[in-house]
Amino acid sequence: MRVLTVIGNRPQFIKASAVSSRLRARAEEITVHTGQHYDRELSQVFFDELKLPPPEHLLGIGGGTNTAQTARMLAALEPLLSDLRPDAVLVYGDTNSTLAGALAAVQAGIPVAHVEAGMRSFDRAMPEEVNRVVCDHLSSLLLVPSKTAVDNLARESVPGRVEEVGDVMVDVALLLQPACRARTEALEPYGVEPGGYLLATAHRAGNVDDPARLAQLVDLLLSLPDPVVLPLHPRTRARLEAADLLRAVEAAPDLHLAPPLGYLDFTALLCNARAVVTDSGGVQKEAYLAGVPCVTMRPSTEWVETVETGWNALVDLDGERARAALARPLPRERPQLYGDGQAGQRVADAVATLAG
């Protein structure tokens, strides 16, 4: 059996690391890296740290609008699918790479397996929500992380086969978070101590592309009650520069900017933080798995269970609500929401059923 895996950004590299070796034990996997994240800080370092096999094909498609980027990916994937003739195409998550991989495969008559299917924020203004909904309705095999995702797909009557396999990010977290927690040297460049700072990330188009919302985001970060470590996404840095806000961020005494980080250093900062403030879906879940409370700078989330259990709070860009959320006591329990750490093997087993 030949499987073509399409990946293109940081969360997908992490997820693929839980699946690829298991899939290659029973099938021929060919990996295509679209180049959606194309610099070393957001790409190659994850292959190195997570021991992910290097991609057999690198498309180099980064930058541009969502529409333009997806169109270029489709144009590049079409001849690859024709030449390689895989039995299945495997995609992860909700990015432009996910959508392009699924759409190109379906147009070529090749079944699609979608890892992290069924997640919904119910906010169609988010490009990621549109991508995941379309991909789910194109997929032959929908591999879901939770009962909530199963229920979402049942309501939509998707035509593909739904299997609850758990979340592959749990596999990675259980394997690497304990060692990352001990990597306190990763905190030293920022002059912070374990439990004495907040880790922040911000990159969503809805927050950083609109200058007015970007200014709100900066005001929120500057109002937080603890020192903040902010690994600065290239997209966010460019928007801050364009809005003449970067100097204010750089001058803030308790806001420590970091470059984009690899998985190990980022996870060390996350595991040792008092709390996380983010607009990333993946970081919300990583915080939950690490037992670190999260404040989400969005009005909605696809990881609704983290909110229901009290470990995550949705505040949009309201600084007062963010500070109130950070003052809340920790919940007494942290249920096992997303599986037992064996999702990667279940994904590989399920994908193998698509042969023939």
Image: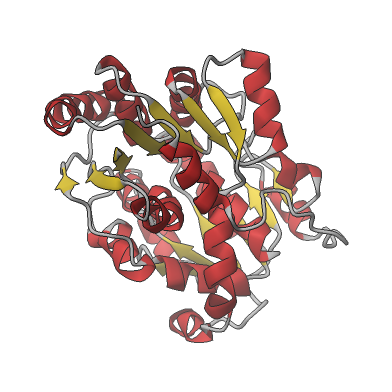
Q: Is residue 65 above or below residue 330?
A: above
Horizontal side, residue 54 vs residue 175: left or right: left
| Residue 310 coordinates in the image, percent (x, y) | 80, 50
Q: Residue at x 74, y 58 (%)?
A: 326
| Residue 309 coordinates in the image, percent (x, y) | 80, 48
Q: Residue at x 78, y 53 (%)?
A: 324
Which image quadrant: the N terminus? Answer: top left
Image-quadrant location for residue 250: bottom left
Q: How is the image coloured?
A: secondary structure
Q: Is residue 254 above or below residue 19?
A: below
Q: Is residue 251 above or below residue 326?
A: below
Q: Residue at x 46, y 40 (%)?
A: 204
Horizontal side, residue 295 vs residue 13: left or right: right
**Residue farthest right in this picture:** 332
Q: Is residue 228 visible?
A: no
How many discs appear? 0
Which sits in the foreground, 117 or 112? 112
Q: Residue at x 61, y 51 (%)?
A: 285
**Residue farthest front in this picture:** 356
Which image quadrant: the C terminus? Answer: top left
| Residue 22 coordinates in the image, percent (x, y) | 42, 55
Which sits in the foreground, 327 or 293? 293
| Residue 88 coordinates in the image, percent (x, y) | 33, 31
Which sits in the foreground, 20 or 87? 87
Q: Is residue 205 visible?
A: yes
